[in-house]
Image: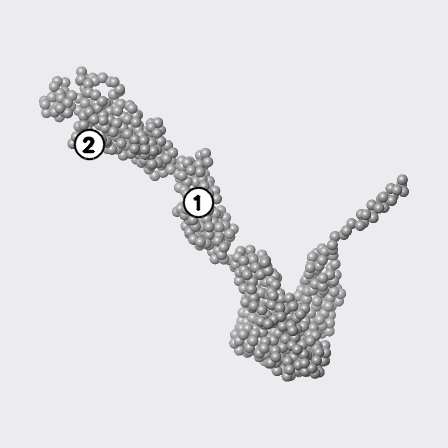
Amino acid sequence: MKKLLLMFAAAAVVLAGCKKDPDPVKVTGVTLNKTSLTLAVGASETLTATVAPADAADKAVTWTSSAPAVAAVDASGKVTAVAAGSAAIVVTTKDGNKTATASVTVTDTTTTPIEPPTPPVATYPITGTTGSLSWSLAQSGTLTISGTGAMPDYAATASAAVTRAGEEAAPWAKYATEIKRVVVQTGVTSVGNNAFAGLGALTSVSLAEGIESIGAGAFAKCAALTAVALPATVETILDGAFADCAALASVTLPAGLESIGDGAFEGCSALEEITVPAGTEIGDGAFPTTTEVITPTTPPGGGGGGGGGGGVTPPPAHVAVTGITGVPTTAQKGIQLTLTGTVAPENATNKTIVWSVKSAGTTGAAITDGNKFDANATGEAVITATIANGLTASTPYTQDFDITVGLPPLVTAAAITGATAPKVGYTPGTGMLTPGNATYTARITEWEGDLNASKFDYGKVYTATIELTQVTGYTFEGGFENLASIAAFTVNGNAPTAFIANNGTTLTYKVAFPATPSLVTAAAIGGVTSPLAGATPSTAITNGTGFTAALVWEPTPALIEGKFNWGTIYTARITLTATSGYTFAGAFGDTAAIAGFTVNSQTHRHRACVRRDVPRHGGQDPRHGGGNNGRDGSRGTRDTLDGCAHAGQRAIHRRAYVVARLAEYLCPRHGIHGEHNNQTRCRLHAQHGRERVRHP
């Protein structure tokens, strides 16, 4: 049994050991701590390679030098300067063959050449003039020469090849370590001596049609330059024009080229072959002995260093890319930009551009959908255009471009309309408003204030939160940062009362609307003079808090010569009008609701007593010609207001009572007796009249 258990245990161990290990992490790239070095002969410096990703399974690398006689490198990346000149130090990963390059310039301490000064801190683009031409250096490292005429000749720097008396260094020489691309535009007729010599970081050159000659040492010791295609107008290449360009692997010469100077391509150890047009004069040592020079009369394999045999070789099938132009240089934050470019020459073998972000800077730049550039902040970004097999059948063409990301136009502040102001009894609503222009949209997101059963209440101030959103192509960023700056964004004429936030895309603030009106309080109305036979009707009436009152007596035709008549019932039509800040809305819809609006302290159906004195003997009713004016010799009559009258009260002291009855006050919502409460007016009816005349 023990033996059987041991067998099972052994089997378990074997099965556990058979579990599949995860795939090793592949190398995706490698970078160097420096891309260029300048060393004196005998000096050394160690380069550090960083393999990505950090958890790559195999981080082994190898080091090589394009010119060991100039700069040697050991297995640890230690570079030792051997002799004056230029070299390219390349680190290559064992896994994936990923590479990174550093250009090395070795100076001879036994001479005193002109040293390029340390590049000053500058604001890009850096610009200047040289002879009749202008130059500009962008932050991406592109040096552009423009204008009309020949480029001057320049003195050699420590890394240049040819120096002549009276010549000064090129004005851009101080930025030698920053220049990665040279573009010479149409109008320039020549490239001067030593114009771009010793630019150790230079990787590509674009020369426009119209250039006729390349000066002596013009591109000498440009250690990182890998390909050159000369325009069809070039006739002469002077001595040492491309000398010691150790990485130069592809050169396209024009069919009309007349001469190549001595040592023009000397030291170009990566140049394996070159086709030279028939009839071109080739100077001594124009090419390295390892370069196969092909001419129309030289078969393949026919020697190097400027010689060759017979036979005819067809032109090369591959046409190298010389440059990309027309790439946008500006973009706007938050607005997608489509990247385009024109590839030269037009008949280049491969013209498909692949875009990538080399440096996003502060912009947060990214490439989507192949050629769409997006940035979420302002600043400078550098993008790279890559054309696979653009230089040679196995070497890509790359070119960097600067893009300045700025802000879109600022939203235009303008008054907003379309808001429904708070109304008593209504439920607060949110939604879209009408903006003042097409640069933004507007809406109410919420209301603040005391509600009554979720509805707007009487006499309250309510505040709306307003949210404005930019329309594509505009921004709130760069403006509208405080209450004063948003003053123009009124809503229904109401100014902003609080600034909340501006995130560039949306602007949020608050607007307080005028207080809702207060409900009128029913209160006694005074100042009304009751009807008195023979008296002129008075329209006097006292206003109340929150309303004004107006009085009209009816019926008017029943008056005699404009005076109250005997035995007639008169109605006082009282109209109440709400003053500013008050309303009748939501109340006073029936007779009971208006009970508080008494007139002369008497409620509806209460009788007011009007007393008339008559003569004790023989007095007559004025309606029958009686002398209430005393012309009959009797005591004159008089009408007085007596507050003692009640229903059924008897006459005293031979007085006849004219009883005025105050009728129902009517303030209906919908046409009771033809009257209406329109929220600001309320009409009351009071009836006055002669009920009976009693005699003792």
Disc 2 secondary structure class: helix
What residue type is disc 2 on? Pro
Could you tell whether 448 is left or right of 669 in the image? right
Residue drawn at x 34%, y 33% is 670
- Distance from label 2 to label 1 (Cα)? 55 Å
Residue drawn at x 45%, y 41% is 429
Q: Is residue 580 above or below residue 324?
A: above
In this orientation, does residue 498 appear? no
Q: Nearer the viewer, residue 128 or 207?
A: 207
Could you tell whether 552 is left or right of 677 in the image? left
What residue type is disc 1 on? Val
Q: Is residue 493 above or below residue 176?
A: above
Classify mark 1: residues with Cα within 10 Å, few (<14), some (14-19) or many (20+): many
Q: Nearer the viewer, residue 225 or 552?
A: 552
- Please say which color scheme the image uses: one colour
Q: Quarter of the image containing the C terminus? A: top left
Q: Which residue is mark 2?
A: 557
Classify mark 2: residues with Cα within 10 Å, few (<14), some (14-19) or many (20+): few
Residue drawn at x 16%, y 21% is 614
Give how far across and how far down residue 314 sits, in percent. 66, 78
Could you tell whether 60 is left or right of 390 in the image? right
Count of picture labels: 2
Q: Nearer the viewer, residue 227 or 502?
A: 227
Q: Which residue is mark 1?
A: 511
Give how far across and how far down residue 24 sits, in percent. 74, 55
Residue drawn at x 70%, y 63% is 98
In this orientation, does residue 552 appear? yes
